[in-house]
Amino acid sequence: MIKDISFKRNAINLISRFDISFSNEIVDRVVKENIVNKILFVPNIKFRTNWEGNILSIFPDSVLEELTKYELHVGDNETVFLEKYNFITGPYLYYTDEFFIKPEHWEIHYKINVDGIPEVYYEHIEKWQVNPCTIAQYALACYDDYIWNENEISKEVFMKQVKYLIENFHVIDGKIAFPYLFPFRNLQYPWYSGIAQGQIVSVLVRAYIITDDKKYLDLAEKIVAFMFVPVEKGGIFTFTPEGHEWIEEFPATPSSFVWNGFVFAVMGLIDYNKICPNSKIAGHINKFILSIKETINIYDTGKELYYERLNKNICDLLYTGLQTYQVRHLYFSTKDIFFKELYEKWKKYFIYDETFLSLWNSSPKKLGYSQRRLSKYVPKIIKRIIKKIICYR
């Protein structure tokens, strides 16, 4: 009786409607009511319905939770049909430098090695290196493409990155850390990064959602545990001068307090706590959110943003956009109005509907270094996706 079940996503890539098409048009009102009465979502959600010919449309009353695997049951064992349809909500929903770059466009700074894993060329050491953060970001971009476009190739590439990550890490006192195997600032390798730990947690949570394999959550738990190892003991956890909890993107001395790296780490913890609720982790997340709020004026000049505290580097257009979309992501994840208001404020610095979007058609010679890279390597299809995200209000 059921021919097809599909769903549509709204502007922010969350599911907003389901369509169930039946092989024959149903005209009997009682039959239609019976079908509607036999619809069940697991986890349960409220919804309204509308019939048009042989298609039954279902509209959830509220935005479905991100990072959740749902089941849609139509009918039951007492009726002549029973269908169970699985679907997943919530892609990553913000851009990063690596998100823009697809393998066929990687020339100077990025490449895919023989194992299908991205490498980055670091000019200060004149070597190609794997970077756990780049691998995680590449995986998340592939996950987005799989969820958005149902692209099975992207799913395969995503799982290849997952396989590499779960086979290449350090175990330190029963905790898992992902090493950087090259020097940076005054750090000697191996050193560890909050941005890598957080984004890899986000990757493994999504691997679990796709596969239902709990080994990914077991690994994520050990990765999260390392995120609270103090810097002075070789970890990445520290406190701001004001006494607020912080996770360092790179644990150099003195502390740099890089803003975007810290937020990526928090985003990973929020993802993990959504799938594996833990009161202790939730308590830390609340303290991290407080840390963002209490120190935000250090990074916000009123017209532009700082990248870190130590060197007071002003963010270029790329990082201004990145940090702006990070706060939007935090708003969607926490529903805290503070981040919505911050997003509305920062996107005015960004001038995304003029300056940023003009990058797509600008001459690379007129742009800064990061912007030249952006203009040069962004393939047309990714431009269209990012334009859609950027133009969403």
Image (tube, rainbow, N blue to C red):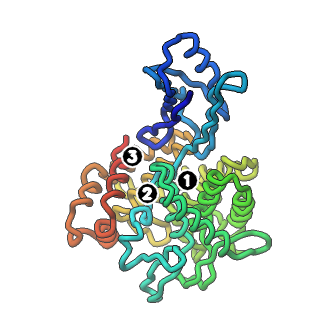
Q: Which residue is mark 2?
A: 95
Spatial distance from mark 3 to mark 2, Cα to Cα?
A: 19 Å
Is 177 situated above or below 275?
below
> How crowded is the residue under tag 2: few (<14 C-alpha within 10 Å), some, or many (20+)?
some
Which mark lies nearer to you, 2 or 1? 2
Q: Position of residue 6 (x, y in %)?
A: 50, 37
| Nearer to the camera, 208 or 319 | 208
Q: Amino acid at mark 3?
A: Lys
Where residue 288 sits: x, y (%)? 62, 54
- The number of numbered discs placed on residues in the rendered structure image is 3
**Marks 2 and 1, Cα distance to the nearest angstrom?**
20 Å
Asked if labels 3 and 1 touch by Cβ distance under 8 angstroms, the answer is no
- In the figure, is residue 246 to the left or right of 389? right
Q: Which mark is residue 31?
A: none
Q: Which mark is residue 292?
A: 1
Q: Secondary structure at mark 1?
A: helix
Q: Please state, as top left, top right, bottom left or bottom right, where the C terminus lies in the image.
A: top left
The front one of 261 and 393 is: 393
Considering depth in this image, is 155 or 207 the residue closer to the camera?
155
Please name the amino acid that badge 1 sits on.
Answer: Ile
* Between discs 2 and 1, the one toward the N terminus: 2
- How far across and down, in percent of the image, does residue 133 sit? 54, 69
Q: Residue sitting at 24 percent across and 57 percent down?
A: 358
Report the Cα–Cα distance between label 1 and label 3. 15 Å
Earlier-in-chain disc, 3 versus 2: 2
Residue 86 percent across, percent down from the top left = 61, 41
Which residue is labeled 3 in the image? 345
Tell me whether the residue at label 3 lies in contact with that at label 2, contact meaning CB atoms closer than 8 angstroms: no
